[in-house]
Amino acid sequence: DINKGWGYLPEIPISTQNTSEVIDTLINCYENLRDDDIDILKEAIDAWLIDITSESNTKCIDQIWTMITLSNIRNHIQLFDSVVIKDIDNKIVDCLGNFFMTQNEDGGWGDAKGDVSSVTRTSLVLIAMNKIIFEPTDYQRNAIEKAINWLLKMQNQDGGWGNINK
């Protein structure tokens, strides 16, 4: 309640990923929320997705979930009188910028810049980008194509994908 966020378990500190997942879920269940629940949701959006400091939101998975959730908020903006579209759009731009700055040379993404590329992280980054980028610039298109090509190269002989290249 003090920090307006959620953790994985009650005894584990709150995190951007967990808070984003809960906010995203509550937005999808909005019609079932009471007025008090909606107030909690709005406070969490303001505290965790719009005003969060960049130092606490540097892991790729945090950026992914922030982007997915912001996209969902953006698609339901009529539900949130107190949420400013400009703030959401600025945060989306920040997340996109971080994605492009942290893409590995091989085309994939790890948990942080320079970490081993992960099929899961790369796939989720592309999902998040797809929710926001409708008309990519040449730079964005090249980064997306590079990621897709890396994913295709990572396919195993049996047709499936593991998480990292061993």
Image (cartoon, grey):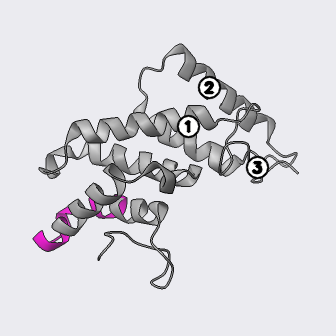
Q: Are marks 1 and 2 in contact (CB under 8 Å)?
A: yes
Residue plotted at (58% across, 49% down)? 60
Q: Are marks 1 and 3 in contact (CB under 8 Å)?
A: no
Say whether residue 143 is left or right of residue 153. Answer: left
Task: Please say if 39 is above or below 155.
Answer: below
Say whether residue 31 is left or right of residue 69. Answer: left
Say whether residue 152 is left or right of residue 140. Answer: right
The magenta segment is 24-38
Task: Please say if 64 is above or below 11.
Answer: above
Q: Position of residue 166 (x, y in %)?
A: 88, 51
Q: Point out which mark residue 161 bears.
A: 3
Task: Give residue 113's quadrant in the image.
Answer: top right
Name the residue type under label 2.
Answer: Ala
Residue plotted at (62% across, 44% down)? 123
Give the camera-side residue of 51 and 138.
51
Q: Is residue 141 magenta?
A: no
Residue under label 1, please give it.
99
How many discs mark residues in the rendered view? 3
